[in-house]
Image: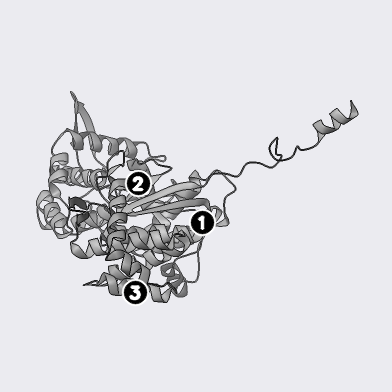
């Protein structure tokens, strides 16, 4: 009996029961991209590679360099047509061969990051030259990669990338296209583009690395209206320059409604704006842009352009010109702002604005991490960069360090 009881009091050997907790599964992250896509390069440089360096031990990374390319069979080969031309096809092949031959992501990803960073910098990138230089700088033998790219092995491997991409459910609509644990939603995509580190840390169920604990992105929300001079000044002088310098440590929420009022008329909402009907149109255009463009790196420059130029003409023509300058298809935004989609979206902006606590009584109205005080408002109005940098608790980007060299004090936020 004693022997039986004793067995019950000790940990059994492997194969029966273990006292140690099971190891948490790593987050599975996949990026579907193409080698010369500017938005892909930006995502790799600003989100994916920094996150990999900080918390690479808690996620498995899959890279699929194919993107919006198309393939067709020609004899015993596959022929690829790429969105950004033959050089992009060459870049995709280089990266695909590197992934296959180097095998270990800790070797292949630094090479791909180097390749993407240097093609992004070049006005006329030469993929083979850039790849060879990156390989040399990282101590990688480039010869096998070069042989792979120009031969049947690379052709077959790139076809596999096409098969992986075409098997996506839902089918990808753009690149970069991110899946997390095999799943893609627009919410996950936005979170990945705005703060991938935060997203990976949130989904990892094991003990968090120190980089996760330190990561506290600053949340700035701006409640405004499109024809408000003070709002325009704030966007031009504070918000947009701060976004350009330290977007990696801040999340921006824009709510273009302001001091407007709404009434329901059947299934639609009627808006009465402080600066007249043109302001209502401007609000609708910006609301639709936020919804359709989704990524703050796309809609923030567009809205900045609209705000800076909105007094030079009617809002629709100004917005169309800004869209053209930035390579944005204005058709979808215009259709949205003049139809039921925009009406419903603007009603949501009204609900967000009316839910403020405390209630706003002027615009621009700024909240910091969901909070508004007059002290926050004043600091945001005159030095938003300093406010964001002082609030952020992680490793500060260089723009914050430069800021602190000029202004050595970080005042307490009331």
Q: Please name the residue shown 76% across and 38% down the image.
A: 11
Q: Is residue 176 left or right of residue 105?
A: left
Q: CA distance from mark 1 to mark 3?
A: 28 Å
Establish if 218 lies above or below 205. Answer: below
- Point out which mark residue 55 bears: 1
Give the percent coordinates (x, y) of residue 104: 47, 60
* Tag 1 near tag 3, CB within 8 Å: no
- Looking at the image, can residue 347 be seen? yes
Q: Is residue 354 left or right of residue 318?
A: right
Q: Please name the residue shown 12% across and 52% down the image.
A: 320
As helix, strand or loop, the secondary structure at mark 1 comes to helix
Q: Please name the residue shown 41% across and 39% down the image.
A: 357
Q: Is disc 1 surrounded by few (<14), some (14 to 19) or many (20+) residues within 10 Å?
A: some
Residue underneath mark 2: 189
Establish if 163 lies above or below 396. Answer: above
As helix, strand or loop, the secondary structure at mark 2 comes to helix
* Tag 1 near tag 2, CB within 8 Å: no
Q: Earlier in the sequence, mark 1 or mark 2?
A: 1
Quarter of the image for residue 263 reads top left
Q: Earlier in the sequence, mark 1 or mark 3?
A: 1
Give the percent coordinates (x, y) of residue 405: 46, 75
As helix, strand or loop, the secondary structure at mark 3 comes to helix
């Amino acid at each position: 009996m004693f022997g039986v009881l004793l067995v019950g009091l000790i940990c059994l050997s492997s194969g029966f029961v273990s006292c140690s907790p099971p190891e948490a599964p790593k987050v599975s992250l996949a990026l579907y991209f193409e080698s010369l896509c500017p938005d892909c390069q930006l995502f790799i440089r600003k989100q994916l590679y920094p996150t990999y360096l900080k918390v690479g031990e808690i996620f498995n990374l899959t890279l699929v360099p194919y993107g919006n390319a198309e393939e067709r069979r020609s004899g015993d080969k596959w022929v690829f047509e790429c969105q950004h031309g033959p050089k992009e096809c060459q870049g995709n092949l280089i990266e695909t061969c590197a992934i296959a031959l180097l095998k270990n992501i800790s070797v292949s990803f630094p090479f791909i990051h180097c390749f993407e960073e240097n093609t992004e910098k070049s006005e006329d990138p030469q993929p083979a030259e850039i790849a060879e230089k990156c390989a040399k700088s990282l101590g990688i033998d480039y010869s096998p990669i070069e042989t792979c790219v120009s031969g049947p092995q690379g052709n077959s491997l790139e076809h596999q990338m096409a098969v992986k991409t075409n098997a996506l459910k839902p089918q990808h609509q753009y690149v970069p296209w991110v899946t997390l644990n095999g799943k893609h939603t627009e919410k996950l995509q936005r979170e990945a583009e705005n703060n991938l580190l935060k997203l990976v840390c949130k989904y990892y169920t094991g003990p968090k690395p120190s980089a996760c604990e330190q990561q506290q992105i600053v949340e700035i929300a701006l409640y405004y209206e499109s024809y408000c001079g003070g709002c325009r000044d704030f966007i031009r002088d504070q918000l947009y320059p701060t976004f350009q310098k330290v977007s990696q440590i801040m999340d921006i929420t824009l709510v273009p409604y302001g001091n407007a009022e709404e009434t329901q008329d059947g299934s639609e909402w009627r808006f009465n704006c402080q600066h007249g009907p043109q302001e209502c149109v401007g609000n609708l255009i910006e609301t639709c842009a936020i919804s359709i463009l989704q990524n703050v790196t796309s809609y923030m420059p567009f809205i900045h352009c609209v705000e800076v130029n909105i007094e030079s003409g009617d809002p629709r023509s100004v917005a169309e010109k800004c869209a053209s300058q930035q390579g944005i298809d204005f058709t979808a935004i215009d259709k949205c702002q003049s139809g039921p989609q925009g009406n419903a979206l603007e009603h949501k902006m009204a609900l967000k604005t009316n839910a403020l606590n405390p209630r706003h009584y002027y615009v621009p109205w700024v909240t910091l991490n969901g909070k508004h005080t007059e002290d926050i408002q004043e600091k945001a109005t005159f030095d938003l960069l300093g406010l964001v940098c002082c609030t952020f608790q992680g490793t500060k980007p260089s723009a914050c360090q430069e800021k602190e060299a000029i202004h050595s004090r970080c005042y307490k936020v009331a």
